[in-house]
Each structure stands twice: as C-alpha cells, then as structure tokens.
Image (tube, rainbow, N blue to C red):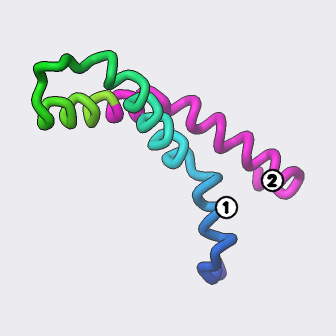
Amino acid sequence: MNKRPVTPSYIVFYILFSPETWRILMGIIFSAFLTPLAVTPEMGASARVLICIMIATIGYSGSGIPGRWISGMFKKLILGDKLPK
C-alpha cells in the first residue's frame, strides 16, 4: 500500500469521514444544551465543569450509531461510485 502525502485536503476528508469526529461533536452539542439544565446556582465552578464533562462523555458514548451513519453518508455523497466495497 502506498503512503499518501499528508495534505490539507487529506486532513479535511479524514475529519469528515471519521465517525469519531461526529461523536465528539455530538457530545459537545449535548453538553452545551444539557449542562445548563443540570447545574444549580449554588454549585461551584469545579462541579459545573465536572457535570459538563460527564454530559459530553455520555453524549459521545451514546452517539456511536449516528456518528457512523453521518460519516457513511459523507462517504457516499463525496466518493459516490469510488467507495471501496
């Protein structure tokens, strides 16, 4: 197998085609929307950060199937008939 040179377009496509990218993004989105609902005013900063990280981790772990689906759709959309079988 030939080594491919690392170019900016290679990095962009790697990011788009990786399910982990979409899982991380969904974890961040879940955390951004759900953390304000889970914290109370009397919580300290460390407790807020801990809850934010916990919700992001739960969002990451729960979005495996959607992450694979999104990356698969990008592969079909961009690669089309060049998609390896």
- Circle on res. 57: none
Q: Secondary structure at mark 2?
A: helix
In depth, the one of 42 and 62 nearer the eye is: 42
Question: Dot 1, crowdedness within 10 Å: few (<14), some or many (≥20)?
Answer: few
Residue of label 1: 13
Kindly identify the residue that appears in the image at 64 percent across and 63 percent down. 12
Q: Is residue 3 visible?
A: no
Residue 30 in the magenta stretch? The answer is no
Q: Nearer the viewer, residue 49 or 11?
A: 49
**In contact (CB < 8 Å): disc 1 and disc 2:** yes
**Image point (27%, 36%), residue name:** 53
Q: Is residue 17 visible?
A: yes
Q: Name which quarter of the figure residue 6 lies in.
A: bottom right
Is residue 70 magenta-colored? yes
Residue at 27% x, 17% y is 38
Please name the amino acid that badge 2 sits on. Answer: Ile
Q: Which residues are magenta?
A: 56-85
**Amino acid residing under circle 1:** Phe
Identity of the residue drawn at 43% across and 25% down? 33
* Circle 1 SS class: helix
Across and down, in percent, residue 20 comes to 49, 47
Left or right for 62, reference 15: left
Q: Position of residue 49 (x, y in %)?
A: 21, 36
Label 2 neighbourhood size at 10 Å, few (<14), some (14-19), many (20+)?
some
Residue under label 2: 78
* Left or right: where 80 falls relative to 1: right
Where 33 falls versus 22 (above or below)?
Answer: above
Does residue 66 lie above or below 1 as drawn? above
